[in-house]
Image: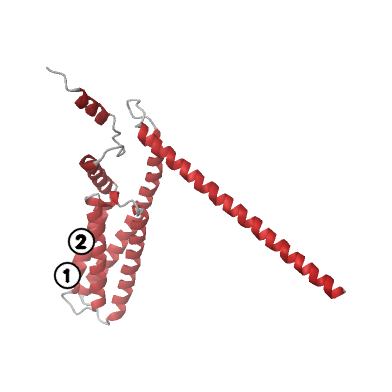
Amino acid sequence: MAAPPPGQEDAQKYKSLQPKDDVGTRKGFRRYRWEFKDSNKEFWVNGHAEVKLLTVACIIAGLQLFETVATHPILILLLTMELSFIAFFVFLNSFAINRYMTFVYWPITEIFNDLFAFGFLVGGIVFAMRARRTLPMAYLAAVVLMGVAAFFAIVDLCLQRRHLKAKKLRKLALLAPDKEGRMPDPKLQAMLEAAKEEEERLQKEKEQKEKEEKERQKKQKAKKEKKKAKKEKKKKK
């Protein structure tokens, strides 16, 4: 069997050195394929997908029940809005689009989304109970489903907090060797070291600015005290 060309052999060796638990230096479609698999694995294994789909099911069932009786339009609008937001986040996580939008820190964004969803749904329940004096069975069932959806929003919030801690641990573990004892890619290590140096530089600049600001305030205070002392001397004369 003929040996592969030198260039192809180097490419295969480079692919085998890529870390399995991190994107490494993958580019193009290979990066998207890894991001797609990792995003869906994270989304389904950690329970986010199941919770969001149950929330969607509760909201859709609530909308169907509200349409069978006379309902205030605000309740329909509120449930439709929440359904759109949840569907948007499911779409982002399913197709790994959030992995390419690095200017948004997604765990925090989803935490705020869960908080707002809980607040709006609880507010909708209070409004629905006050909007009618008589509560038909379908109307009451829809309100109960809104409460279940609000509960699932809190469950997803707790899952996001756990995911946020895992992100920190994952970042710290990037420089550790893999199961076979191989060290991570040198480029990845250089990137992490450069990020750490940049963080330290920014921290030093911040400390320097704070120090300069304190010195400036001391000088201004000393000048004011001198002026005050001069005025008191003039008054005594």
Q: Which residue is mark 2?
A: 57
Query: Which residue lies most toward the bottom here?
Result: 133
Q: Residue at x 75, y 65 (%)?
A: 225
Q: Residues within 10 Å of mark 1 (few under 14, many from 20)?
A: some
Q: Residues within 10 Å of mark 2 (few under 14, many from 20)?
A: some
The N terminus: image quadrant:
top left
Above or below, 41 against 187 in this view is below
Residue 166 location, quadrant:
top left
Q: Residue 188 vs residue 69: left or right? A: right
Q: Nearer the viewer, residue 193 or 144?
A: 193
Looking at the rendered structure, the kind of residue marked 1 is Gln
Q: Residue at x 41, y 39 (%)?
A: 192
In space, the residues marked 2 and 1 are separated at their CA atoms by 11 Å
Q: Which mark is residue 64?
A: 1
Q: Position of residue 146 (x, y in %)?
A: 27, 67
- Tag 2's secondary structure? helix
